[in-house]
Image: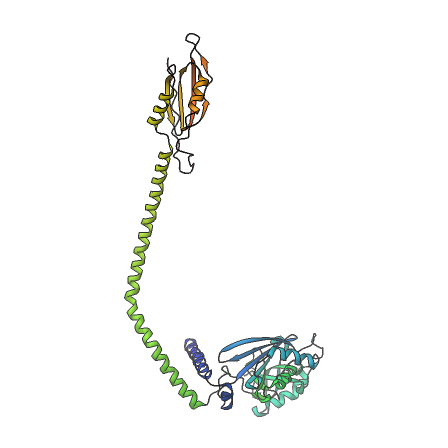
Amino acid sequence: MSGTTGIKATGRRFLGWWLGELLGLVPRRWARTIGLGRDRLRVVVAGSQATIALEGAAGERELGTATVIAAGAGAAPPPADIVARTVDEVLGDVDAEACDALVLLAADRALRRELTIARVPDADLRRAVEREIERYTPFRADQVYLFFAVDRQKSDDRTTALAIAVAPRRFVDPVIERLVVAGVPRAAVRVGIVGIDVALATDGRPAPPAAEGAGLRLPRPIAVALAAVAIFGTTATVAPVLRLAILRAPLADRAAQTQAEAEEVRRLLGQVEKMSEGLGAIVKAKAASPSVVRVLDRITALLPDDTYLDQFNVVGREIEIEGTTRASATLVRALESIPMFEKVNYVAPVTRDPVTGAERFHFSIQFAGGGPVDSRSSLPAPPRPAIRTNP
C-alpha cells in the first residue's frame, strides 16, 4: 500500500513540475487573470520570529525571518511598525497579490488539552467546544484559533471525548495583518498549527488547508488535457531512451572487457619500467666505477724505475696500492697529479727497509676520472679483499 502511495506522490510531483514548466511560458499577469496559478507564502511562527518561505510550482525557497512576537510568553506583541518593517524586508520583491498564505504556529506555542462534553450534533460541536474553552484554557474563544478532533474510542452515546489545541491570536495575527497589507487576499490566508492537518480561515472557521501544489490551481478540463500531454510527452521521451539502453548493453560489456585488458597492459608496462630503472642503475654504477685495466696502465706508466708494486686492488671507486719506493712523498705528488685520481691517503705508516733503504708504502687512492658517484644509483661496494704482502 505504501509503495502505491509513493508512486502516486511521485507522479503528482512530476506532473506538478511539468505543468509548472508549461505555466512558466505564460505571462504572470495572464496566468493570474485566468486563475491558472498562485504561489503560497508559508509562515512558521516560533518564539519571537516568523520564518517565511515561498512555495510554488518551482519548489520552495526560504525568504528569511521577521520579528513578530515580543520576548516572553506574557509580553505584548511588538509595535506594529516593527512587524511591518521586518515582514516587508523579508518579502522584498515577492508579488504578494499573487500568493495565498498559510500561517503556522509552532507546536510548542500551541496549548493542548483533552476534555469531555455532553454529546451534541456534529453541526453544533464547534459552538459547544467554544463555550467550554474558558474552563480548560486561560483564553476566551475570540482570543484563539481552535482546533479539535473527536476521540471515538473514548466517546459514547452520551458524551464526546475531544483533543483540542488552541493557537493564541496574539502570536499569529500581527503577521497575518501585515501579509494582508502587503497584498495577500484575506480570504486566501489560512491558519494552522505545525503537526495538525486542519487549517482555519482568519475568522476562525474551518477551511480546507492550502493544497500541496498551491502554485497550480487548474480548471479540471485543462488539468486533464495537460496531464494527457504530459503522459504522451513522457512516453515519447522514455521510449527512445529504453531502446538506446537495450542497444548499449553489448557495447557496455565490450567496454568493460577492453578496460580490463587496458589495466593488464598498464600493469605490465609498470613492471617493464621498474626493470628498466634497475638496469639503468647498474649501467650508471658500472660507468662511474674505474676501469681496472685503465687505472693499472696509468699507474705503471707513472711509477719511477725504483718503485715496485706488491699489491693492487680496486674496491668500488677506491684503489689500493702497496709496494716499495725510494721516496714515498714524491710518489704521492706524482699520483695526485693525474686527473683521474682525486686524493691519496696513507692506509699505513711508511716504513724504511734498513738493508736496502727503500720505503714500504700502503696508499688508498680516490678515483675521480668518472666524476662524483650518485649514492642513490651506486651498487654496494664488495667486501674489501685482504692485503697481500711480500714475504
Q: Which residue is located at x 44 percent, y 21 percent? A: 332
Q: Which residue is located at x 37 percent, y 18 percent? A: 309
In the picture, the quarter occupied by the C terminus is top left
How are the residues colored?
Answer: rainbow
Q: Mark yes or no: residue 110 visible.
A: no
Residue closest to the eye, 367 or 206: 367
Q: Is residue 103 above or below residue 319?
A: below
Whole-percent x, y for residue 150 in the image? 56, 84
Residue closest to the eye, 244 or 269: 269
Q: Which residue is located at x 37 percent, y 39 percent? A: 281
Whole-percent x, y for residue 253 in the image? 29, 63
Residue closest to the eye, 140 or 266: 266
Whole-percent x, y for residue 81 in the image? 69, 81
Q: Is residue 367 above or below residue 53?
A: above
Q: Quadrant of residue 95?
A: bottom right
Q: Mark yes or no: residue 63 visible.
A: yes
**Left or right: 234 with respect to 67?**
left
In the picture, the quarter occupied by the N terminus is bottom left
Q: Quadrant of residue 187?
A: bottom right
Whole-percent x, y for residue 77 in the image? 70, 79
Total numbered badges shown on the rendered structure = 0
Q: Which residue is located at x 44 percent, y 83 percent? A: 22
